[in-house]
Amino acid sequence: MIKMLRSALLLSLAALSLPAVSAPLVPQKPIRIPGGAGRFDYMMVDAAHHRLFATHKGVKKLAVLNLLTRKPLPSPSVGTTQGIQVDAAANAVLLGGEDEKRVLILNRRTLSIQAVVPVPGPVDAIALDTKNGLLYADHDDHAQIYVVDVHHDKLMHVYAIPGQPEYICYDAADNTIYQNVKSTNQLVAMNPKTGAITHKWSTLPATLPHGLAIDEKTGMAFSAGVNGKLVVFNLSTGKKIATVPIAAHVDQIIFDPGTKRVYCACRRAISVVQETASGAKLLGSAAVPANSHTLAVDPVTHSVWTTYYDKSGSYFLELKVH
């Protein structure tokens, strides 16, 4: 089974003209997720509870995997959710509801719904301000961010942004919200207290910026465009310090502080980018099945996880680092 999977992935990679031999990831046997076939959105690891989450919006559930046993756990019904965050202080899992126009707050232990916060529009990506217990939720494809007090279960503010949002991050090191704006090809910085836009940077040559990740120790930000460009910013100076080629059609990206690598989910490939003192460099791209546009990293093993689906079902896929 594993050999067949690897052969299929290599053929897929060859079709994309990506460097298979240099990709430092090895795919493992897929893990079938109960509940049927359906598309996914965001993923996240809850390291303290050894669980992997994926918003399985195609079947309106939250897919859950036990990272110790590699066994799927029961998938709670959560509607068409997209963004996901873990709030350790509130002992909660937070989800952004798309069709239902809401933020869901789940009990972190039982994954039962303990609160629902209605918002004016559909929610896509979300970011958690860990210092103040506030959740910043993108209005899907509209120029707004919703601010939700997840400790008191209420909508606090609606902030305007200069275009259509995509991915959003909170940087605790400088207490700033960073937002990719795909309609204007920009990365913008926001004061989380006032909603004021403090800086705007062009992401060109990266267009339609989707994935966003930050290394809080070095102050580097990585913004990935669907055209196959990853740009690296020095947040302290605002300067663009590198542009790295990646596979096209990127969606979610994630930074692993343990390996100083950025992983970019590009639907049929995961591009691996190494942070360097002067910026970043491409290590290679590993082929993955179609629909693999989201990912997460286990901070203990440093394995990369993605999800995908086909006509017969849905799957978790682990890629081990070598």
Image (spheres, helix red, strand yellow):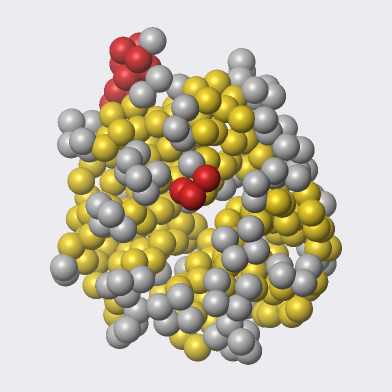
Q: Nearer the viewer, residue 295 or 44?
A: 44
Quarter the C terminus occupies: top left
> Residue 5, relative to residue 300: is it above or below?
above
Which of the 4 image quadrants contains residue 161? bottom right
Q: Residue 39 at x, y = what percent?
A: 62, 34
Depth order, front residue of 295/112 = 112
Would you say residue 245 is visible in this rendering?
no
Q: Residue at x 28, y 54 (%)?
A: 258
Q: Nearer the viewer, residue 58 or 55?
A: 55
Hey, which quadrant is residue 302 in on the image?
Answer: top left
Q: Position of residue 189 (x, y in %)?
A: 49, 80
Residue at image coords 38%, 66%: 214
Give the x, y percent position of residue 274. Answer: 23, 54
Q: Is residue 164 left or right of residue 245?
A: right
Q: Position of residue 119 (x, y in %)?
A: 80, 66
Q: Quadrant of the N terminus?
A: top left
Q: Is residue 4 left or right of residue 125?
A: left
